[in-house]
Amino acid sequence: MATELAAVRAVHKPWGVRDLHPWSSLDGSDDAIGELWFERAGKDARTPTLLLKLLFTSEPLSIQVHPDDTFARAMGMPNGKSEAWYILSAEPGARIGVGLTHRITPQQLSVSIRNGSITELVDWRPVAKNDVIYIPAGTIHAIGAGIVLAEIQQRSDATFRLFDFGRQRELHEDNGVAVAHPWPLRASCHPARLTPVRTALIASRHFVLERAELPEGSSWALLAEPETWILVLDGHAAIGLSAVSIGQSVFVGGGRTSIEVGAGGLTVLIAYPASRPVDSLLLALGEQSGTPMRSAAPALPELADPPEAQGPARTQGPTRIQA
């Protein structure tokens, strides 16, 4: 099956940045780059079900919401959009908006969109490097300035903008109110150590997101799902026939792929469509026998789209992973 170094597409945004180092050498000096999309390299390659991105913010993004699969399909779209963020860096005071501070009615949400007071209703939370946030479809959310993050999402461009911080782009009040969950989002990420090198960050109905930390000089077999994305956060390695380093991504179309880790070790994010982590995803190759060494992964509950928050309970901040 295919193992290929992902192509990178730069997406210019008014809230983007000029300097993408160390994640990319692309030059945004003439036109700010807000997103890097990782894509299959071949023109005839099958379109993946997930989309992996890097986002770079110098200004807040719009306050927005995405539809779930049911609503999206009713509008003629193939699917909705749930997503997850992994914070790569954050300036002091950087924050994200996730859900609302308290429950309101759809009518109140409409009014807040029209008069701009929705900015006061959003639950703004500080973020730092290694935070993990899951944004199920229907969650009102925003990304503040001064953040670099990796995003894995259902492949969809269905976005309903509710507030745009003075950029005068179109708002989508009717559809936004129809799909939004106008209440707090309870913390739902519970990262779990699967093996000495693997941590499951998120297991949702649409995808699994893991972080793997592989020691220098080690050799591994990746037994990939039919669609597996790998993003290098730190270090160097050869994955299949591709030499990779920080900010690069590899797409694996299933089957067995070798990983040879270079000096300094390797830290990666791994994402694939599934509801539970795959137990045998990474197999360490033993130095003596050359045979795989398997470590069983504990069960991890699937993240469901959260129900309406009841009562006055406060939501928790983003889940922070120790590097």
Image (spheres, rainbow, N blue to C red):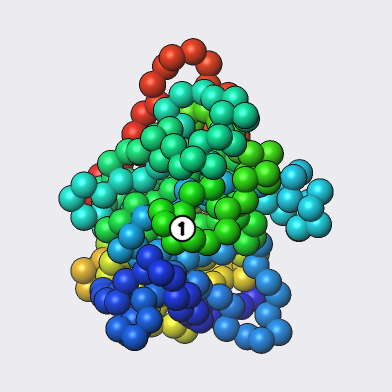
* 311 is higher (above) or lower (below) than 83: above
Q: Nearer the viewer, residue 227 or 287?
A: 227
* 148 is higher (above) or lower (below) than 69: below
**Element type where label 1 sits in the image:** strand
Q: Nearer the viewer, residue 236 or 85?
A: 85
**Image spot of residue 224 (x, y percent):** 57, 63
Mark 1 residue type: Glu
Quadrant holding the N terminus: bottom right
- For residue 207, say whether it is visible: no
- For residue 315, say whether it is visible: yes
* 167 is higher (above) or lower (below) than 119: below
Direction left: furthest residue? 92
**Image spot of residue 168 (x, y percent):** 49, 61
Residue drawn at point x = 70 percent, y = 75 percent: 46
Residue drawn at point x = 68 percent, y = 39 percent: 178
Residue drawn at point x = 49 percent, y = 49 percent: 163
**Image spot of residue 234 (x, y percent):** 28, 66
Residue position marked by numbered label 1 in the rendering: 151
**Image spot of residue 126 (x, y percent):** 28, 41
Direction top: furthest residue? 311
Q: Nearer the viewer, residue 262 or 50?
A: 50
Question: In the rendered image, which quarter is residue 32 located in?
Answer: bottom left
Direction front: furthest residue? 115
